[in-house]
Amino acid sequence: MEKKNKSSKELQNLGKDLVSQIKKGKNPKMKVPQRTINNIVYDKKSNTLKLGNKESTREFFHTGQAKKFLQTVEIAKIIKKELIDTGKHEHLRGIFYMAKRTIPKTNINLVDDQVESDKAIEDLEVITGLSREQLHTSANKMGSVVGKVIIKDGEDAIDWSKLGRGGWSIPSITDEIEFKKVNAKYIIYMEKASIFERLVEDKFWEKNNCILVTSQGQTTRGIRRLLQRLSEEEKLPIYVLTDLDPWGIYIYSVIKYGSIALAHASERLTIPGVKFLGITADDVTNYGLEKHFIKMNEKDLKRLKQISNYQWFKNNKAWQRQFKMLKEFKAKVEIQALSSKGISFISEKYLPEKIKKKEFLD
Amino acid sequence: MEKKNKSSKELQNLGKDLVSQIKKGKNPKMKVPQRTINNIVYDKKSNTLKLGNKESTREFFHTGQAKKFLQTVEIAKIIKKELIDTGKHEHLRGIFYMAKRTIPKTNINLVDDQVESDKAIEDLEVITGLSREQLHTSANKMGSVVGKVIIKDGEDAIDWSKLGRGGWSIPSITDEIEFKKVNAKYIIYMEKASIFERLVEDKFWEKNNCILVTSQGQTTRGIRRLLQRLSEEEKLPIYVLTDLDPWGIYIYSVIKYGSIALAHASERLTIPGVKFLGITADDVTNYGLEKHFIKMNEKDLKRLKQISNYQWFKNNKAWQRQFKMLKEFKAKVEIQALSSKGISFISEKYLPEKIKKKEFLD
């Protein structure tokens, strides 16, 4: 409830400020921190991508800015009135449709494309300092979680250890759940739901006292917040498990360091302590996975080069060694290749061994 | 346990039959029902796509068939020994890696591409009459469910009404869960997880005593089996909710009539009683959604034409009327467009009204 009031108040202040400017006979304007690439900095202290200090001004009486100004104010109104004040949440696409109306006495739509409402929402995030979740705006719902954890979501107490083979379906917004009881030593976050099902069937989480999280593809904000909260509130280490390819490494990179698109939200999304568990280039030789090499194509190789040049990887010797080995391999390896060593090799040998030996990349 | 024995036995019989042929000095062969397009028929009686009666023979001493023969036998062995007999399940990709080994004293891999192991598994399905699930083979894990239902999965009793905003994460195989208590009048299956979250937040399932299921994209086998079982075992009507476009209509078509790729599995996947709830072309005029038209591109229009010519739609007047209207619109409409009428318009007006008036397409 308190959080809700805070968000509501911030938006109200934005409106009040504009009204007061108008009453003073001024051209109403807002200060918007710039989200362009040249205002995104890699903050060595926090080890994350962040926004710099550059700001733009958005004015109402300005032919190039009037529409954007209007969009920002309208979206702020929708979010305050229809979402925060009613306790509801809406997806980006739904907010687009809620905002898509003809400006009275014109033929002009307030927004014609979702990009416009999305940008307005991002602007509101940086103007108010509120996160998208605090603005009651959601993105994708995806992923599952299991483990010896009891949470509270609304009225429901949910025991993640009593959900059979499915697990709890992670909602798009995880800011409002409460951790009631957490009994786990660490978290494994994995790219692939098929590996999650393997580990669940093998009762890996029960035997090893850990939490398993999967996303089916890209890591949603809901999952990133969930992981960040478990890391900060419960001090649990998090290990990332992906394919050995530039795309898997980038999944790890985004969770740990943030992304350019969401640099303004780094504080609420990144998890500097997260570690990469595998598949590593060393695993290939240690576990004899060479015969399951899949040749990298042009796109893979280009992406690998880009990633190896990222500021946060550039001076990281352990990672540069991995990149070098990968470039020599000219090949990638899927996590499922471990099945060739036996269906439960991953849960009986690979994971326990690597975790025991602390074979992580940081 | 009984099911497991049945599957194990069927595979054993296949092996025994081959051994007995060999002992008689014969060239060992298997009869494989054809899964090519010219053996797929639309069965008017059951209203589903099915396999016809054409069979092929696969022989061991045959230059063109020896490898496929070997692949089929090897995959049968892996499935019996590593999966069914151990009670484990594996994804298609994992089975591929389990089968991918070099044939002794050659340089030849048993399988080089997942397509080969996938085909062998499909062949085993039609040879033995066992479903992929009975062969302990899984595909994608996807989707969520909520409602007043208590199921049992392994040792866990899971109450779908006590899972907060997330719901139960549906596993890739839903054949083995038990329905313990089902208190619902109908099921809504929806294409989009964002709509699921809207309905969950509005407590639609509680107020209207129904079950909500979503998939995030294509309908997985796990969801199709779950819906089919709820339809058959609990006699619940199922309503499908998608965008108004050829892709949404095809989602409905696959659930109801089956698909060409899985025609051999129709009996265990299709749900002839399922109805299409919306968005319909009539909704566009009834609810004034014209302003949210999104122009159809070439690909959309081509797909629309294909679908309207499907045998099961061809003589269906109600659907032909829809297709005609869509062709006139030359546009599609997203389900989220309903948000333009108010954030909870879908749960407070659109759905209750349509369901009360029984405005379904069959």
Image (tube, coloured by chain):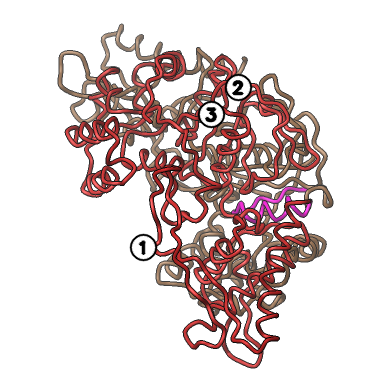
Chain colours: A red, B brown
Q: Secondary structure at mark 3?
A: loop
For marks 1 and 2, give the one nearer the viewer: 1
Subunit of label 1: A
* Residue A58, magenta (yes or no): no
Q: Nearer the viewer, residue B72 or A182?
A: A182
- Mark 3: few, some, or many residues within 10 Å (few <14, many ≥20)? many
Residue receiving disc 1: A38
Q: Is residue B299 left or right of residue A111?
A: left
* Residue B191, magenta (yes or no): yes
Residue receiving disc 3: B133
Residue receiving disc 2: A184
Point 23% across, 24% down: residue: A291
Q: Which residues are magenta?
A: B186-203
Compared to residue B61, the image places residue B263 above or below, namely below
Labels 1, 2: one chain: yes
- Mark 1: few, some, or many residues within 10 Å (few <14, many ≥20)? few
- Name which quarter of the figure residue A155 lies in: top right
The x, y position of residue A25, in whole percent, is 65, 89
Q: Nearer the viewer, residue A69 or B69?
A: A69
Q: Secondary structure at mark 1?
A: helix
Compared to residue B118, the image places residue A299 above or below, namely below
